[in-house]
Image (cartoon, rainbow, N blue to C red):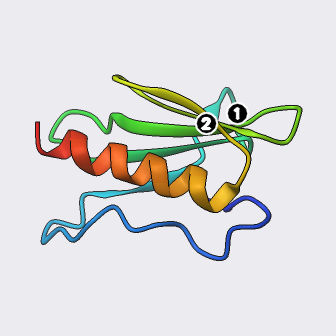
Amino acid sequence: MIPPAGLAEMPSLGDSVYNDRGWRNPLRGEHFDRSLWEAYRIRADSAPALASVRLVDDGTFEVSSSAAFAKVADPQAAFELAAGWAMASLDR
């Protein structure tokens, strides 16, 4: 996983004794999509994305989850928002 320019490190997705969550650039065919980052959690049968951040052509970031969407200009703010939404979905 390669973080976007302007982001020193990826935000934490909370502590887990199982080490079952993280950030990824998903595969699209045979290549990684370097304009998309997903916060995910590993389960017994899958690893669903809890929230995602996409870098769009105008240089902004689209942050989304199953319950929300936002367009954010600052990379740090975009990833912190996605991390918050991802951690909130862990409580459901």
Query: Which of the two discs, 2 and 1, sits closer to the camera?
Result: 2
Q: Which residue is mark 1?
A: 30
Q: Quadrant of residue 53?
A: top right
Image position of 83 (left or right of 42): right
Compared to 8, does 67 lie above or below?
above
Work out whether residue 88 or residue 41 is closer to the camera in this orientation and state it. Answer: 88
The spot of residue 41 in percent (x, y) is 28, 47
Q: Residue furthest right?
A: 58
| Element type at mark 1 | loop
Q: Amino acid at mark 2?
A: Leu
The N terminus: image quadrant: bottom right
Q: Residues within 10 Å of mark 1 (few under 14, many from 20)?
A: few
| Element type at mark 2 | strand
Work out whether residue 70 or residue 86 is closer to the camera in this orientation and state it. Answer: 70
Work out whether residue 51 or residue 85 is closer to the camera in this orientation and state it. Answer: 85
Compared to 66, does 19 lie above or below?
below
Compared to 52, does 22 lie above or below?
below
The spot of residue 24 in percent (x, y) is 52, 51
The spot of residue 73 in percent (x, y) is 74, 46
Q: Which residue is mark 2?
A: 27
Q: Amino acid at mark 1?
A: Glu
Residue in the image at 18% along x and 45% along y = 90
Is the C-beta separation of discs 2 and 1 under 8 Å?
yes
The spot of residue 56 in percent (x, y) is 79, 33
Residue in the image at 27% along x and 51% along y = 87
Q: Quadrant of residue 12?
A: bottom left
